[in-house]
Image (cartoon, rainbow, N blue to C red):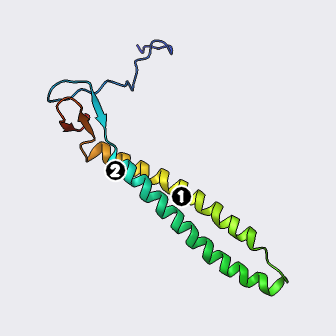
C-alpha cells in the first residue's frame, strides 16, 4: 500500500546544514570562492571582448552596405548597439564563468577555511 503525503508531511530534500571544521569542530567557517570570482571576472572580460569583436565585424559589413545604399549613416546608433552588445556579452560571460567557477570550488578546491584553526577543507 502506498502512502500519500501532504505538503506539510514530506521530508525536506535539501537542508542547509551548518558547516563545521573537521579538524577542530568550529562553526566559524569562511568560504573562499576563489574560482567563482576568477571565473566571473574572466568570463565578463571574454564576453565583452567577443561581443565587441562581433560588433566590429557586423559594423564593418553594415557600414559597407549603408554607404552603397544610403547617403548618410548613423554612427551613434552603431556605437550604442556595440556598447549594449558588449554589456550583454559581459553579463552572460560573467554568469557563465561564475557558474563554472562555483563547480570547481565545490568539487576540486578546498573552498572552506576555519577561522579558528585555519584548516582548509571541502564541504561534504
Which residue ends up furthest to the right in the rendered image? 71
Specify whether 23 is left or right of 97. left
Q: Is residue 94 above or below residue 57?
A: above
Q: Position of residue 103 (x, y in %)?
A: 35, 46
Looking at the image, residue 20 lies above or below residue 52: above
Determine whether, in the image, residue 113 is placed left or right of residue 78: left
User: Is the Cβ of the residue at disc 1 closer than 8 Å to that at disc 2?
Assistant: no
Query: Height in image: 30 above or below 80?
Result: above
Question: Which quadrant would the C terminus be assigned to in this image?
Answer: top left
Q: Quadrant of residue 65?
A: bottom right
Which residue shows up at 61% across the image and 75% down it? 56
Residue 79 higher or lower than 94, as above or below: below
Question: Could you give the CA–CA distance between mark 1 and mark 2, rounded to whole angstroms?
Answer: 18 Å
Rendered image quadrant of residue 33: top left
* Coordinates of residue 39 in the picture (x, y in percent): 39, 54
Tell me residue 50's x, y (percent): 52, 68
Callout 1: SS? helix
Q: Residue at x 72, y 84 (%)?
A: 64
**Label total for image:** 2
Q: Which residue is mark 2?
A: 35
Name the residue tied to disc 1. 90
Where on the picture, by quarter, is residue 15?
Answer: top left
- Looking at the image, the residue that sits furthest to the bottom is 68
| Residue at left offset 50%, top offset 13% | 6
Quarter of the picture containing the N terminus is: top left
Q: Residue furthest left?
A: 23
Q: Disc 1 or 2, which lies upstream in sequence?
A: 2
Bin the neighbour count of mark 1 within 10 Å (Cα to Cα): few under 14, some 14-19, many 20 and up.
many
The secondary structure type at the circle numbered 2 is: helix
| CA neighbours of label 2 inside 10 A, class few (<14), some (14 to 19), many (20+) | many
Amino acid at each position: 500500500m502506498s502512502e500519500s503525503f501532504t505538503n506539510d508531511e514530506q521530508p525536506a530534500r535539501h537542508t542547509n546544514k551548518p558547516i563545521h571544521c573537521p579538524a577542530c569542530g568550529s562553526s566559524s567557517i569562511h568560504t573562499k570562492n576563489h574560482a567563482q570570482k576568477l571565473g566571473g571576472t574572466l568570463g565578463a572580460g571574454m564576453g565583452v571582448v567577443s561581443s565587441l569583436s562581433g560588433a566590429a565585424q557586423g559594423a564593418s559589413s553594415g557600414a559597407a552596405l549603408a554607404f552603397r545604399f544610403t547617403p548618410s549613416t548613423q554612427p551613434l546608433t552603431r556605437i550604442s548597439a556595440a556598447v549594449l552588445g558588449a554589456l550583454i556579452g559581459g553579463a552572460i560571460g560573467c554568469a557563465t564563468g561564475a557558474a563554472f567557477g562555483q563547480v570547481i570550488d565545490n568539487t576540486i578546491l578546498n573552498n572552506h577555511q576555519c577561522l579558528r584553526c585555519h584548516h582548509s577543507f571541502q564541504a561534504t
